[in-house]
Image (tube, grey):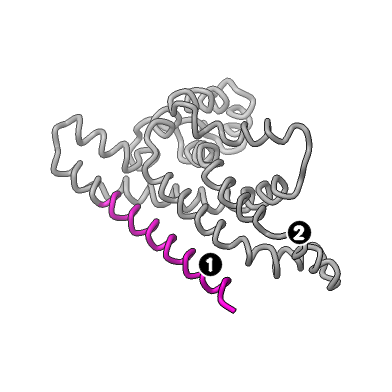
C-alpha cells in the first residue's frame, strides 16, 4: 500500500475543490441566468474534458505549461521550478479536467430556481450578495454538493491527464492511480488490488453519502 501516493491524491483533490468550486459556482450562475448567441460555444468549451481523450487533453496542458510556454516561463520565474511535472502543475491540470464535473451540476441547480424567487428577493430589498447568500445558494446547495463530491472522486481516480502533465515522481506527482499502474506493471497484484479496493470504497462511500444528503435536502424542501 503506497500511503504517500494516497495522501498526495487526497491533497490534490482537496486543492482542486478549494480552487475550482468558487469559480464553478460563479460560472454556473452566470450561464444559468444569461442568454446570448455564443452561449452554446462556451458550454461546449467547458464540457470538452468530458469527450476529449485524456492523452489529448494532457498533451495540450503539457504544451501550455511547458518550460518554453509563457505560462511555464512566468511560473518558473516566480517559483523557481517548472510548472509541468510538479504538484502545482497537477493542481492546474486537475482544475481544468474537472471543470464539467463542477460546473454542470451547479448550473442545472441554478437553472431550477424559479425566476419569481429571484424577483421576490429583489422586491424585498435584498442586495445581490444578500440574495445570493440567503436565497440562491441554499436552493442550489444540492447541485453544489453533488459537484463537489463528483470532482473529489474524479480527481482521486484520474490517470491519463495526471501521467501526461505530472509524470511519475514519488512524493510529488505520483498519485494513487499511477501507483496502482506501477504495481500492476511490476506484478505486485496484492498491493494493486488493495489500493484499487481502497479507491473503490472511498469513491462509493462519498457518492452514496452525497446522494443521501441531496435526497434528504430535496425531501426537506418539498415538505410543507
Is residue 52 found left or right of 205 in the rendered image?
Answer: right
Mark sitting on residue 139: none
Is 219 colored magenta in this rendering? Answer: yes
Residue 186, horizontal then vertical, whole percent: 17, 31
- Determine contact: label 1, label 2, CB under 8 Å: no
Counting from the top left corner in percent of width and height, residue 99 is at 56, 41
Q: Quadrant of residue 122?
A: bottom right
Picture residue at 45% right of the left edge, 49% below the top: 13
Give the image location of residue 204, x and y in percent: 33, 54
Q: Is residue 9 left or right of residue 123?
A: left
Front in this rendered view, residue 188 or 109: 109
Residue 214 colored in magenta in the image:
yes
Q: Is 51 situated above or below 14?
A: above
Residue furthest top as drawn:
68
Q: Which residues are magenta?
A: 198-224
Q: Residue at x 48, y 48 (%)?
A: 151
Point out the tag, 1 or 2, that comes first from the N-terminus. Answer: 2
Q: Secondary structure at mark 1?
A: helix
Identify the residue at horizontal 69%, vertical 51% (top origin).
29
Between the residue at mark 1 and the residue at mark 2, the CA separation in whole angstroms equals 19 Å
Categorize mark 1 by other alpha carbons within 10 Å: few (<14), some (14-19), many (20+). Answer: some
Residue 218 image label? 1
Which one is in front, 77 or 96? 96
Tag 2 secondary structure: helix
Image location of residue 21, percent across then percent down: 58, 52
Q: Is residue 79 above or below residue 205?
A: above
Q: How many marks?
A: 2
Q: Is the stretch drawn in magenta largely helix, strand or loop?
A: helix
The correct choice, above or below, for 98 with respect to 212 in the image is: above
User: Which disc number belongs to residue 115?
Assistant: 2
Amino acid at each position: 500500500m503506497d500511503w504517500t501516493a494516497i495522501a498526495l491524491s487526497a491533497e490534490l483533490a482537496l486543492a482542486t475543490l478549494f480552487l475550482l468550486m468558487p469559480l464553478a459556482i460563479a460560472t454556473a450562475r452566470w450561464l444559468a441566468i444569461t442568454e446570448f448567441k455564443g452561449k452554446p460555444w462556451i458550454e461546449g468549451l467547458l464540457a470538452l474534458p468530458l469527450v476529449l481523450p485524456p492523452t489529448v487533453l494532457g498533451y495540450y496542458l503539457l504544451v501550455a505549461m511547458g518550460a518554453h510556454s509563457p505560462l511555464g516561463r512566468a511560473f518558473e520565474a516566480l517559483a523557481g521550478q517548472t510548472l509541468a511535472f510538479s504538484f502545482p502543475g497537477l493542481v492546474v491540470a486537475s482544475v481544468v479536467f474537472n471543470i464539467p464535473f463542477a460546473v454542470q451540476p451547479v448550473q442545472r441547480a441554478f437553472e431550477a430556481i424559479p425566476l419569481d424567487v429571484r424577483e421576490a428577493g429583489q422586491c424585498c430589498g435584498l442586495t445581490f450578495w444578500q440574495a445570493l447568500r440567503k436565497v440562491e445558494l441554499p436552493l442550489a446547495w444540492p447541485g453544489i454538493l453533488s459537484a463537489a463530491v463528483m470532482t473529489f472522486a474524479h480527481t482521486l481516480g484520474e490517470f491519463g491527464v495526471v501521467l501526461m502533465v505530472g509524470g511519475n515522481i514519488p512524493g510529488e506527482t505520483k498519485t494513487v492511480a499511477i501507483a496502482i499502474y506501477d504495481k500492476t506493471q511490476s506484478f505486485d497484484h496484492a498491493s494493486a488490488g488493495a489500493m484499487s479496493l481502497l479507491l473503490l470504497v472511498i469513491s462509493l462511500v462519498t457518492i452514496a453519502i452525497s446522494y443521501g444528503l441531496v435526497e434528504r435536502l430535496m425531501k426537506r424542501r418539498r415538505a410543507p
